[in-house]
Image (cartoon, rainbow, N blue to C red):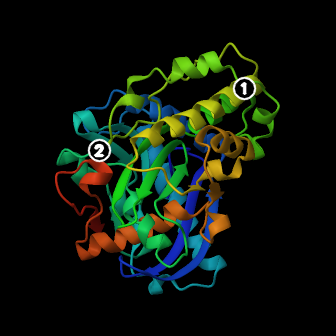
């Protein structure tokens, strides 16, 4: 899984039938280098003008080759490092790198050639998970909510429960007492913070939220950012990574900018909670945001609720999305739903994904 943060590739081994987890295996992470991140950043810009999801103009073709190569190396290194035979892998779930998401135009673009990856690994690959849902009029995102009930099934956790993934974009899954699902993108997560930091320092992210912790929140900028029409729109709904004003905090010192953007993320989650059927008894946070104590503190303050990281409840904050796409790949093979009306606005429970044989 390479998410909207564009920071690297997460790998997770899961033994599953798509409906239950038999065993969680090891996980790993391979970061993109600075040069690779720079190409991906250019690709995001070049993708803004796309009208054909198969086109690869400008830097997109180079970025796609980088994504494929990084995923091949990540899988091979993972298997070698854990002494796992490639032949024992039944299927690889390959999300690709989202570079454009415009569901209102029935357009979503994930670069990454699943057929080429299948040939290079010599194993079946399921990819292009979002297209069928978007073509049917769904949002195509978020996809992990289908798997969150599977991941938590054997854990003693209160209901209703919210699983909040804070990658580049934030998304929430509400799991009711009867396993009813409601899911949507809450707003920004790490993308705006990471982009501001990268522009100014070249660093990929604010480690432990230390810079943000030293800054002051500009609440007026938070209010202006929260005036975006997206936040009052009812779910299901989803976002492009670059939906918000990346320059909104450019007049602030770096520490104040990161503090303000963290507060924007927390406030967008708190606002999104109004769209949930009931107040969650617990919020479980996964993704890169779970590694940011400053952001977690702001979430607790603005939600006024119990917030724990995925690691604290026995799951993996870092690997949850990769684990989800492993399970989604198996569900695709079995023709099981990947999306539901309550998670993407799809007209009916829908399967999806494309199978590439080596």
Mark nearest the camera among 1 and 2 is 2
In the rendered image of this protein, does residue 211 appear above or below residue 322? above
On the image, the x and y values in percent for residue 17 come to 36, 81
| In the foreground, 283 or 104 | 283
On the image, the x and y values in percent for residue 55 come to 29, 39
Residue position marked by numbered label 2 in the rendering: 139
Instruction: Please report the residue visible at 46 percent of the width from the left and 29 percent of the height from the top.
Output: 45
In the rendered image of this protein, does residue 172 appear above or below residue 85? above
At numbered mark 1, what does the secondary structure look like: helix, strand or loop? helix
At numbered mark 2, what does the secondary structure look like: helix, strand or loop? loop
Instruction: Please report the residue visible at 61 percent of the width from the left and 60 percent of the height from the top.
Output: 318
How far is mark 1 from mark 2, CA to CA?
34 Å
In the rendered image of this protein, does residue 3 appear above or below residue 53? below
Sooner in the amino-acid sequence: mark 1 or mark 2? 2
Say whether residue 32 is visible: no
Say whether residue 147 is visible: yes
| In the foreground, 34 or 7 | 7
Badge 1 local density, few (<14 within 10 Å), some, or many (20+)?
A: few
Residue position marked by numbered label 1 in the rendering: 200
On the image, the x and y values in percent for residue 351 come to 23, 63
């Amino acid at each position: 899984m390479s998410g909207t943060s564009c920071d690297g590739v997460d790998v997770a081994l899961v033994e599953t039938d798509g409906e239950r987890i038999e065993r969680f295996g090891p996980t790993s992470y391979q970061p993109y280098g600075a040069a690779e991140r720079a190409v991906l950043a250019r690709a995001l810009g070049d993708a803004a003008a796309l009208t054909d999801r198969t086109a690869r103009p400008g830097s997109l073709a180079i970025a796609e080759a980088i994504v494929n190569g990084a995923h091949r190396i990540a899988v091979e290194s993972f298997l070698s490092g854990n002494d796992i035979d490639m032949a024992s892998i039944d299927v690889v779930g390959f999300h690709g790198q989202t570079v454009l998401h415009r569901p209102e135009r029935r357009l979503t673009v994930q670069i990454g050639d699943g057929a080429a990856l299948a040939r290079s690994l010599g194993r079946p690959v399921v990819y292009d998970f979002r297209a069928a849902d978007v073509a049917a009029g769904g949002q195509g995102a978020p996809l992990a909510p289908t798997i969150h009930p599977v991941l938590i099934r054997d854990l003693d956790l209160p209901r209703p429960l919210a699983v909040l993934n804070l990658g580049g974009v934030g998304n929430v899954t509400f799991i009711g007492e009867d396993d009813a699902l409601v899911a949507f993108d809450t707003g920004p997560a790490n993308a705006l913070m990471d982009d501001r930091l990268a522009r100014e320092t070249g660093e990929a992210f604010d480690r432990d939220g230390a810079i943000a912790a030293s800054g002051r929140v500009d609440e007026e900028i938070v209010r202006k950012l929260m005036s975006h029409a997206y936040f009052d729109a009812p779910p299901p709904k989803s976002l492009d990574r670059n939906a918000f004003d990346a320059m909104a905090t450019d007049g602030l010192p770096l520490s104040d900018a990161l503090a303000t953007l963290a507060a924007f993320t927390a406030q967008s989650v708190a606002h999104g909670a109004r769209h949930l059927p009931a107040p969650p008894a617990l919020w479980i946070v996964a993704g890169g945001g779970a590694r940011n104590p400053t952001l977690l503190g702001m979430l607790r303050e603005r939600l006024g609720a119990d917030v724990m990281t995925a690691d604290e409840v026995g799951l993996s904050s870092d690997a949850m999305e990769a684990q989800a796409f492993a399970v989604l790949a198996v569900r695709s093979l079995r023709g099981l739903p990947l999306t539901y009306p309550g998670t993407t606005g799809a007209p009916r429970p829908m399967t999806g994904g494309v199978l590439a044989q080596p």
